[in-house]
Amino acid sequence: MEVVAEPPVNLAFEAAKALVEDKTGIKFNHVPYSGAAPAVVALLGGHIDALDVSPAEVGPHVLGGKLKMLGIMADQRIPAFGNVPTFKERKIDLALGTWRGLAVHKATPPAVVEVLRQVARKTADDPALRQGLDKLNLGFAYLDAPEFAQAMQRDHEYFGKLIRTTGIKI
């Protein structure tokens, strides 16, 4: 591939590009876009050769036969794209995802924090949430506060090292 599109100053996209380059030895020409949607339009129009975005952002175009998904940067295949291998299946040791969390001010009373944790857990257990995520081809994982803090720390260390070793500028 000669060209890859990414939003400017987005660590997830920069990290994905840097990791794919590192794992494959391929170098990409970075073409900045103001977001995934304009980059997808550029790919559809033949202005760029490839991009790295979430499956949700290209899913309709892949399912409609307008784009081809080359690989999934996750540990498991995505059901809607069951024929698309993971990078690991393609012998590229790479799995990369994004996460979202619920945060409150550090002075929030413990009772309020506990209610929010219970509501978050109940929402995570709701089949309607899972069905909605599945329709959008988005993955699901739930971690409560202590485990989520550990995951954040692990990712902070990992991406910090990646930034230092690859020279990513944000």
Image: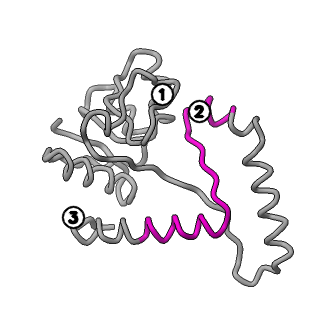
Type of amino acid under label 1 = Gly
Q: Do tag 1 and tag 2 residues touch (Cβ < 8 Å)?
A: yes
Query: Considering the numbered disc 2 on the image, is that residue within a helix, a strand or a loop?
Result: loop
At label 1, counting other C-alpha atoms closer than 10 Å, the crowd grade (few under 14, some 14-19, many 20 or more) is: some
Q: Which residue is mark 2?
A: 136
Q: Which quadrant of the structure image shows residue 54?
A: top left
Residue 27: x percent and y percent?
A: 14, 47
Q: Which residues are magenta?
A: 131-156
Predominant SS of the magenta segment = helix
Among the two numbered marks 2 and 3 on one chain, the one whose residue lies closer to the N terminus: 2
Badge 1 marks a residue whose secondary structure is helix
Above or below, 17 against 91 in this view is below
Residue 150 percent location from the top left of the image: 54, 69
Work out which quarter of the rendered image holds the C terminus and state it.
bottom left
* Residue for badge 3: 166
Residue topped by disc 1? 59
Q: Residue at x 72, y 48 (%)?
A: 124
125 is within the stretch colored magenta: no
Query: In the shown orientation, is residue 55 left or right of residue 26?
Result: right
